[in-house]
Amino acid sequence: MTRPLIRIHNAETNEVIDREMNDEEFAKYQELEQAEATRLIEIEAKAAAKAALLDRLGITADEAKLLLGGN
Amino acid sequence: MAITKATASSIAPAAKGDLVVGSATNDAAVLAVGTNNTVLTADSSTATGLKWATPAAGGMTLINTGGTALNTTTTVISSIPSGYNSLRIITVVTDPQDDGGGLRLRINEDSTANRHAQGFMGATSNVQFNQTSVPITYSQDNGTPNGITITDIVFYDNTSIWKFATNFGVVNSYLDNARAEFIQTWGAYNQTGAVTSLEFFFNGGVNASGGTVYVYGVK
């Protein structure tokens, strides 16, 4: 499997190397990817819960803002 | 005594740009013009008390020659030299491969937990070090790269204090790419070593599909 690429620009020599991530870098990358997936799931869950609540109350999001004094 | 063209010519400057200068009390000498782009500088050790010298370097020096393209998953600028007062990092037209990607900066490629802290407008007090990088942008649109960000790290080569980054910029909003998303963030790194490398990546492992980062040393 091809791993994501990492680019290293050495400011001292001006050498630019593109290579696949090594094991350690790839593990960090996967952690980051997982964390982002979790974050997106949480955002979607919150949005779904909010929509369900508005539906139960029978009001729109704008009307809910008015009730809460938001703008 | 008034200096006329005749008296000045009698000292006989040899070429355009030569100067007639005092070399001692009641004595004059010719100072030959300097090479292009040099400036006249006082120097008591010379016969005329003057010399032509290259102006002292100042301003900003691009450290990563030519800039570094951001079109891989991760980009590292390594071997950052010491000796400047601060680093100025400028990103232009960065473009995440997917909508909503936010560009991150990791100092010294250090992904150890609890060493980076991030501050946003409205979230700046009593902030924990619970990050492994700091934000450059939040959530960018992909495909409409028009943005620019500017990040400063002062005392970056000091080895006894934490490092702080101030960052601001604007990118296309991912909610509506015809709108702007303004960014003002702060980053902190609770280690005292000099900053010798900078790592850039989009959150969530999103690939970068465009953009360039320039790292300047500022005198």
Image (cartoon, coloured by chain):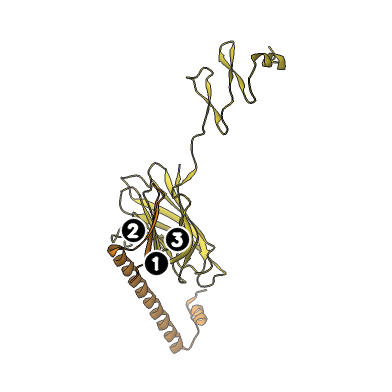
Chain colours: A orange, B yellow
Q: Which chain carries label 2?
A: B
Q: Which chain carries label 3?
A: B
At label 2, the amino acid type is: His
The tag earlier along the polypeptide, 3 or 2, is 3
Horizontal arrangement in the rendering, residue B18 relative to residue B140 (left or right): right
Q: Which of B35 and B39 is in front in this view?
A: B35
At label 3, the amino acid type is: Leu
Q: Distance between the residues labelled 1 and 2?
A: 15 Å
Tag 3 residue: B70
The image shows residue B74 at horizontal and vertical percentages of: 38, 62
Tag 1 residue: B203
Horizontal arrangement in the rendering, residue B36 relative to residue B211 (left or right): right
Instruction: Report whether residue B125 is seen.
Output: no
Is residue B3 placed above or below B88 in the rendered structure? Answer: above
Q: How far apart are marks 3 and 2 (CA)?
A: 22 Å
Q: How crowded is mark 2: few (under 14 residues within 10 Å), some or many (20 or more)?
A: many
Q: Nearer the viewer, residue B23 or B100?
A: B23
At label 1, the amino acid type is: Asn
The image shows residue B213 at horizontal and vertical percentages of: 46, 56
Q: How crowded is mark 3: few (under 14 residues within 10 Å), some or many (20 or more)?
A: many
Tag 2 residue: B116
Outermost residue toward the top in this view: B26
Instruction: Report whether residue B176 is seen.
Output: yes
Is residue B80 placed above or below B111 in the rendered structure? Answer: above
Residue at 43% across, 48% down: B87
Residue at 49% across, 86% down: A59
Same chain for the residues under marks 1 and 2 in the image: yes
The image shows residue B25 at horizontal and vertical percentages of: 56, 11
Q: Which chain carries label 1?
A: B
Same chain for the residues under marks 1 and 3 in the image: yes
Image quadrant containing the N terminus of chain B: top right
Q: How crowded is mark 1: few (under 14 residues within 10 Å), some or many (20 or more)?
A: many
